[in-house]
Image (spheres, grey):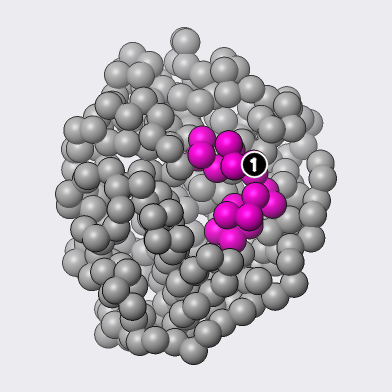
Amino acid sequence: MSVSKPPEGHQHHQSPPTGALDAISSWPVGTAAAVVVHGDAVVDHFGAITDVFALASITKLLTAVTVLVATEEESVNLDDEVHGAPKGALLRDLLDHSSGLAPDEPKALSQVGQRRIYSNMGYELAARHVATQTGIDFATYLHEAVCLPAGMTRTVLEGSPAYGASSSAQDLAAFVIALRSHRILSAHGVSQLSTPSRPTVSGVLPGYGRHDPNPWGLGAEVRGHKSPHWTSPQNHETTWGHFGRAGTFLWVDPSRDLAAICLTDTTFGEWAIERWPQLSTRILNR
């Protein structure tokens, strides 16, 4: 696969903090790091942005992008049937959680396309499909297809492609910048990642209950009009990203060319439900 070198300095440029992230210092967490990205630069930061944190389900963004790279390299096709998935479920259905698969086991709970059932198993099957078709270990493929071209030097996938990656805030800023500048995926690929697929399908957003509809792209959760939600009520409906049970989130608001990444060492819970939207509002109004 082709590997391009990222423009020098993009993921390292940092402007003086504005204070939008100061609230993190009062959060009930052990350690935290955060960055705000505007365009192709980090414009605000908090904590040690090179420290490595468990990402939990933000891993799914990295995995989905890797799968989409494999489609652009014509190693796999989004319309492939995938071994172990429910009959009739395609690779694309695994990425947008509409395959009907149970969350953590290879059994169907619904017909394909009828419900949005958030499934770690779906991502594990998707990754296995790429590895089988390419003959390349999926963690290696992710490293070569995503980390190297983006300049992500501290990101590693160990374990499940649904939740097993670790990374730094700086690396995830580089990831966002590389997606924006199409160094990893084409514009069409980024659109597939972040534009609602089967936009009218409803389902449960983990931690936040049932939403009708519950829009999701081929990898990224799309904000839409969900309430309650982990982003700010002021985030545009096209905002996309993911949060992780490890106490982590990443969102991109295309309407403002703005992204925010926050990593902590404290499991998602009521503290995050209260504070994450407040922080995102501060970032949007910085």
The residue located at (51%, 39%) in the rendering is: 191
Compared with 163, 268 (above or below) is below
Q: Is residue 195 left or right of residue 285?
A: right
Quickly name the residue at label 1: 186
Residue closer to the observer: 155 or 68? 68
* Residue occupying the far right of the picture: 2
Magenta portion: prevailing SS class: helix
Residue 84 lies in the magenta stretch: no
Work out whether residue 140 or residue 151 is closer to the camera in this orientation and state it. Answer: 151
- Whether residue 146 is visible to the viewer of this picture, yes or no, is no
Q: Quadrant of the C terminus?
A: bottom left
| Residue 36 spot, x, y in % from top left | 45, 72
Residue 177 lies in the magenta stretch: yes
Q: Is residue 131 left or right of residue 198?
A: right
Closer to the camera in the image, 134 or 163: 134
Q: Is residue 20 left or right of residue 87?
A: left
Which element is circle 1 on? loop
Residue 26 in view in this figure: yes
Residue count near mark 1 (Cα–Cα under 10 Å), binned few <14, some 14–19, many ≥20: some
Percent of width and height locating residue 82: 57, 19
Residue at position x 28%, y 26% in the image: 201
Magenta region: which residues?
175-193
Counting from the top left corner in percent of width and height, residue 30 is at 37, 80
